[in-house]
Image: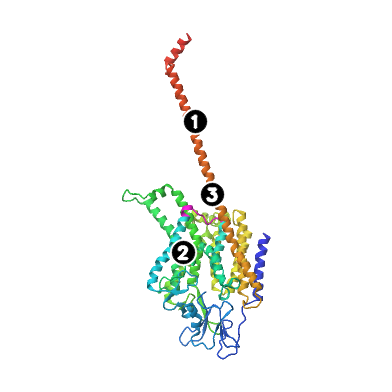
Amino acid sequence: MLTCILIPLLLLLLLLVSTTITGAATPLNGTCDNCPDFKSFLSCDPQTCDWLLLNGYWAGNTSVGGPLLVGGCPLGFCVSNTSGDHIWIPSDMTYAISDFACNQTNRMGILCASCKPGFAPAINTETFDCVPCDSRSSRVNWIYYVLSVYVPLFAVFLLIIVFNVSLTSGPLNAFILYAQVVATTLNFNAQGASSFTLVYGAGSTAFEKSYQIPYDLFNLNLFVSLLPPYCLSESLNTLDIIALKYLEALFAVLMIALITLVIWCQDRFKCASNFKCRCYHCCKRRKSKMATSLVQAFAAFVLLSYNRLCLITIVLLAPVRIVNKLIQTVEMRVYYNGDMLYADSYYSIRYKLLGFLFLLLLIILSITLLHYPVRWLDWLVGKVRCLRSVYPTVSIAILLDTFQGCFKDNRRYFAGLYLALRLLLFFAFSLTLLQQLLLQQVIITIYIFLIGFLQPYKRKYINYLDISIFLNMALVNMLEFYIASTNQAETDRMPLVICIVFESILIFLPLAYFCSYVIWYGTRQHHSRIQQRLLQLYNKSLRKDKSAFFLNQEMQSAANDDLLDNLGYSDVSGDSVTDRGRDFDT
């Protein structure tokens, strides 16, 4: 217990110390004419008078003849320098500075928000790369999209339903959380470029895919990144693509709701004809098993969809500040579509309203798992009758138990805390990179303290397992903070290399645990089925032996009856037997 407390404190202390020692990149001040001075965002080289734009930032005018402004770009929208902190803009450049930031990514507009004519955002990349797109290819790509996204989702849906897979059990809670966070929330793109480029060079993309692909499976992102980038329509912008991903995240949940509705309707309404579906009869014969599978599947897909819904919602609602030379906010624009103002009515009606509805749904789900059942609520509902309407019915209680069953009775609210953690980590996206990593470190440390002190699980070893995975997450986040706050252009790169290699090892440790757990669980289930089969064969043979024994008894009884008939003692219950007995005595 003491170790669980000291290690997070040490990590947080080291994180704060690294903030005060390294800090951010030193602003570059120039003496050239017409040199912009946007602190470290945009400045001049004092020798060549070339402009220096910080990686991941855009500079330009938001209106014709307006002042020069600077704003942060979404990852991959603006050009970045992988070998330094800034990109060099020639002093003799003959076109707009905004075009220089967007040209290499086939983009244009404010914050490089729009694709150039003939290009459209890709549906299957995290950075929404602008790829060639025309009406002919887009029609084929829609079919390709359904086959590559929804068919694998339907296969996973059937797998969980048929085999009654439970993903809400205690040993997998922390791992699924870790996998979802590493694949989405933890930012490994320090200073506009991948942190792994320094060690792996051109192979950094392959290395990132080696852990993102297996971890992204728990975000229901099934091998989509392995496919070449493709578009759906030239008329779709980045926000349309983001909103379309809501349907991907909720596809399995909607399928379960549809099956439940069909079963409910068939239970309550008679068919007009005598024809009955064999599947329906099968479901009726196995009604209890089917209900259990649906509940387990619904809980599993809610858990897998929650993190992705958080990501889509936060990205859809994210604003960005456009600042002037004094680093004062001049405009608030939509982060993933800088051509739109954040207060624009078109954006508010079409996208912001949708995002807020899903945000409300996510918050309600977390509060529900935090709310039910708690001892003080049981007592309060028993005293106040009007509150019984908010108390769960039997069916809802069974569903909640799939999330909370692995926790102690007085710690069942931890199921809601685990969901709330996903949402809290995503809210850190609204901050700068260093602030985001620092806030994430504080949140993770608090959760380590909660698990260490309260010991919420019924099985003691699961508490230590969760603490170990959370410590791994804290170490990875702290190392990434150090990498992001250190100037990669420094001559002595050995400390950075050591941190990146250590970070790479830590990322794969939970994946190794998951593979070991799956092998152990599969082996145990196989042995259990073999034992059940052997027991069934033994019982079957025992029943056969009993049947043979009783058959022999019946045959022996029949033989005895025949013998009595032959001796003239057929009427064993009548007076004739008694008379013959008397004659025999005489």
- Mark toward the start of the polypeptide (3 vs 1): 3
Mark 2 vs mark 3: give the one in front: 3
Picture coordinates of residue 177, whole percent (x, y): 55, 62
Q: Residues within 10 Å of mark 1 (few under 14, many from 20)?
A: few
Under tag 3, what secondary structure? helix
Picture coordinates of residue 387, whole percent (x, y): 49, 58
- What amino acid type should be assigned to the residue bearing mark 1? Phe
Which residue in the structure is indicated by mark 2? 249
- Is 532 displayed left or right of 3 in the figure? left
The residue located at (47%, 73%) in the rendering is 129
Distance in Å between CA atoms under marks 2 and 1 = 61 Å
Q: Is residue 20 visible?
A: yes
Q: Magenta stretch?
A: 160-170
Residue 359 circle label: none
Q: Is residue 499 above or below residue 460?
A: below
Which residue in the structure is indicated by mark 1? 549
Q: Is residue 446 visible?
A: no
The residue located at (53%, 41%) in the rendering is 535
Residue 526 circle label: 3
Picture coordinates of residue 125, whole percent (x, y): 48, 70
Q: How is the image coloured?
A: rainbow
Confirm whether the magenta stretch covers residue 169.
yes
Quadrant of the frame with the N terminus: bottom right
Distance in Å between CA atoms under marks 3 and 1 = 35 Å
219 vs 470, nearest the viewer = 219
Mark 2 vs mark 1: give the one in front: 1
In the displayed orientation, state which residue is furthest to the left.
Answer: 273
235 vs 345, nearest the viewer = 235
- Mark toward the start of the polypeptide (2 vs 3): 2
Q: Residues within 10 Å of mark 3 (few under 14, many from 20)?
A: few
- What amino acid type should be assigned to the residue bearing mark 3? His
Quick check: marks 2 and 3 in contact, CB under 8 Å? no
